[in-house]
Image (tube, coloured by chain):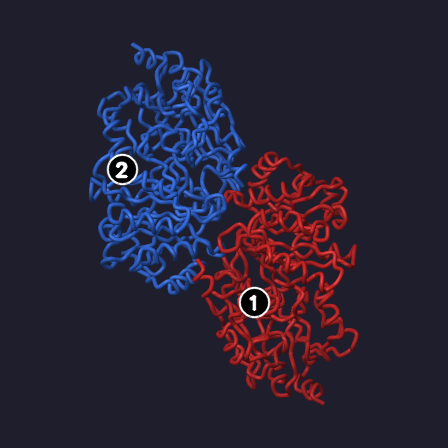
Chain colours: A blue, B red
Amino acid sequence: MTIAAFRADLGDIPVEDHPRIVQQRSRDHYWYSPVLKAKLDHVTAEVVVSPRTQEEVKTVLAAAYRHKVAVTPRGAGTGNYGQALPLAGGAMLNLMNLDRVIDIKPDRVRAEAGIVLEKLDQQTRPAVGGELRFHPSTYRMASLGGFIAGGSGGVGSIRWGGLRNLGSILSVKIITCEESPREMELTGEDVLKVAHAYGTNGVIVEAEMPLAPACDWVDIMVGFDDFLAACRFSEAITAQDSLLLKEVAPCAAPIGQDYFNRHKPYIRDGQSVVLIMAAPVAVEPVLIHLAYHGGEVLYRSDKASEEELRRLPPIYELAWNHTTLRALKVDPSITYLQTRYPTLKHVEKIVSILGDELPMHIEMTRQDGAVTFAGLPLVRYTSEARLEEIIAIHEDNGCAVFNPHRYTLEEGGMKRTDAAQLAFKRQADPAGMLNPGKMIAWDDPGFDLNSGRAWLFQGLAATAGAA
Amino acid sequence: MTIAAFRADLGDIPVEDHPRIVQQRSRDHYWYSPVLKAKLDHVTAEVVVSPRTQEEVKTVLAAAYRHKVAVTPRGAGTGNYGQALPLAGGAMLNLMNLDRVIDIKPDRVRAEAGIVLEKLDQQTRPAVGGELRFHPSTYRMASLGGFIAGGSGGVGSIRWGGLRNLGSILSVKIITCEESPREMELTGEDVLKVAHAYGTNGVIVEAEMPLAPACDWVDIMVGFDDFLAACRFSEAITAQDSLLLKEVAPCAAPIGQDYFNRHKPYIRDGQSVVLIMAAPVAVEPVLIHLAYHGGEVLYRSDKASEEELRRLPPIYELAWNHTTLRALKVDPSITYLQTRYPTLKHVEKIVSILGDELPMHIEMTRQDGAVTFAGLPLVRYTSEARLEEIIAIHEDNGCAVFNPHRYTLEEGGMKRTDAAQLAFKRQADPAGMLNPGKMIAWDDPGFDLNSGRAWLFQGLAATAGAA
């Protein structure tokens, strides 16, 4: 039996084969999507392998290659697209034991892939006064390698852009899946080959990330009677380059009232809220802009009681996909979309068409130098057909959709697979053992690499050419 | 005699009255403009008063009010618009002796107005690892108060915007010119009343500024055969929010060859150059983008010899108005403009119309969240009439001009005077003794505060409304 032979080559590397535990460890947050839930609920690996060192990762990959066992690399499993679901069964490669911090410099940190992002910052802050430039809302769970392999940006992208931007990841070390697995250090542009590639073309075991100056961010929640006024305010403060901000997210009513369980006592009926993280030095100017836009302060952590600080989650755990998560916990029929609204007018148009069927949630970001409305609207899901209509309404109105209801790299629109990446997979995973089924370009040699849609990770050539 | 009576009230505060020295200290860099040079060359104060403490400033201002002696506050006199020229004679108020650093915190510094900007950073860097967010190219000469009263932004504005943005100046302390001069602390929006007001409505004696993380910036000079390619590259790297940059300035040939005396051996004939300051962590990505755009590295300080580092000025002393200064030193017929090009197409259009009559110099900045081509083109000056034509060509092609050939606040287009600022001058300088002749709205009660032109400092209401 293949798996038995594979296991026999692993020595004392921990292997878990209890079906319930393996299934649990075979999952990510794909169930945010009813479409993915229906398609992927049965998926499970046969074993979970948990190497403790990079040498053990090589042992696992050599055995997988030798015995043709599919291997799906996994961090904390906090992705939402089924990135970490082992479509072909085989082995789930749990990398959370590789959690060493290797080197901290004033402006960068090098660590192993399995370290939890918050733990990484807990080491760099006292050491050099630095922290990661941005992180997902799953900061307290997600791993560094998982973020690089399956994430795109998050809290802090309002200042620093996203993982797709050159310079956001300084270096990645991968291990190939071959007869004799090799280490490869990718720097510069080569990093983009494995960023957001779901571990399909190499197992990320280490990365070097730039640090931003650490800051005692102040959590602020403000309220507006009108959601568009909340958006105008959000755009205005984001556009002030003088304001050091880490997070600005307008959420339409009744998102705050219905889904922010701990914060709802601060929010009046009908109020839309904006979630903000600001440097202490930016708080006063933000409040002046707030007054100009007719909003009111609902909560600020720098004026909160000890009891409030203990009781309330950090504001970033209301934002990004935690908004979706909190809604789902209250109302299982909720799902979401990932969109991009070129201007406030586009937001207004979509809100006017879809109303409360699409409770609007925007993350203010900087994308290629422009203040951008990145949408993560909730969707009151009724059917896959209606979801497709909602997507079509966006596209018909000039708003890009990065469909989170697809589990392949290409169909989600987050990652443009180009010839360079495909060629790299041939080097790093010649037998196609890594996370099979996720890269269409690999499985379908006739796939059009240049299909005309919007991609978030579009590769450097396109970025450089577009500017 | 008025001045004699004024002097008699000054006690032992140092006063200089040697005409040659007084005339020399009555000047700023107004002579960058042949127009201002013709109009203002005869201007001089009668005395220079150099108080050593804020109490002495009060003594000077009380005496000025009592004896109706005009007072023109002055820092290092590095402004280019005649800001510090005493149109009504009287006393030049030299504030360079007020140079104490009062308080350094991790994210801000409070200091007296006369401290030189570089000296300020020399104290904050070792103390808290912070430095000013941006500074003029006259960093090694200019004072903090002079920068606030007469400057707008500079090296670092590519990341942090300008002084006009709320949050760029945290607090300003002024002394009023009245019978009993008062101290006033302006914070928040009130700061905008005295920022870039040329000291017409209060004498700035202290300010609190936010700090950015200090960085060992790498100076880089790159070359392109084509100026527009240099601009495309400059726009592309500026738009990468992931790249920590402090300066990006494309300068068309033959600016580098003809005017950058020490750097010219690095520049080939016909090459346009881009002046860059990048964080160490951003150098490699910048060079990758450079390769994409077909440019070549001409100089980088992180690979320079000790001898080069000693011999060459820092790259910021080729940029902003140092570009103009270096050109003027070689060719006294050169002057300049201050412009804003909405897009690269606008740059291209102006270059195609004006060619070598307007050797193009752009400073990449962020303005209200947008990557912006701020122009400081050189002008091969022939006549005032032709200069006006060149301005008209800009405006006819949709490019704003902030005319540096005007000495009043309003005519230059940098400062929109509004009712609040005018009202504030009535409080802070009821007799109109401070820098007379610079604020038209004061001298001409019929002046249209809302005339339709472009203003750089347009006040918060307009900024908030525009967003």
Q: State whether residue B118 appears in this view.
A: no
Residue B8 falls in image quadrant: bottom right
**What secondary structure is marked by label 2?**
helix
Q: Residue at x 46, y 15 (%)?
A: A180
Q: What's the chain of the residue with tag 2?
A: A
Q: Position of residue A195 (x, y in %)?
A: 44, 32
Is residue B183 shown above or below B272?
below
* Residue highlighted by disc 1: B415
Relative depth, front residue between B138 and B162 = B162
Along the horizontal axis of the image, is A69 left or right of B404? left
Please state which of the two labelled residues, at mark 1 or mark 2, is closer to the viewer: 2
| Residue to which mark 2 is pinned | A387
Q: Looking at the image, can residue B12 be seen?
A: yes
Question: Height in image: A237 above or below B407?
Answer: above
* Kind of residue sitting beneath label 1: Lys
Q: Quadrant of the C terminus of chain A?
A: top right
Three-letter amino acid code at the position of disc 2: Leu
Horizontal and vertical percent position of residue A248: 38, 51
Q: Which mark is residue B292?
A: none
Q: Residues within 10 Å of mark 2 (few under 14, many from 20)?
A: some
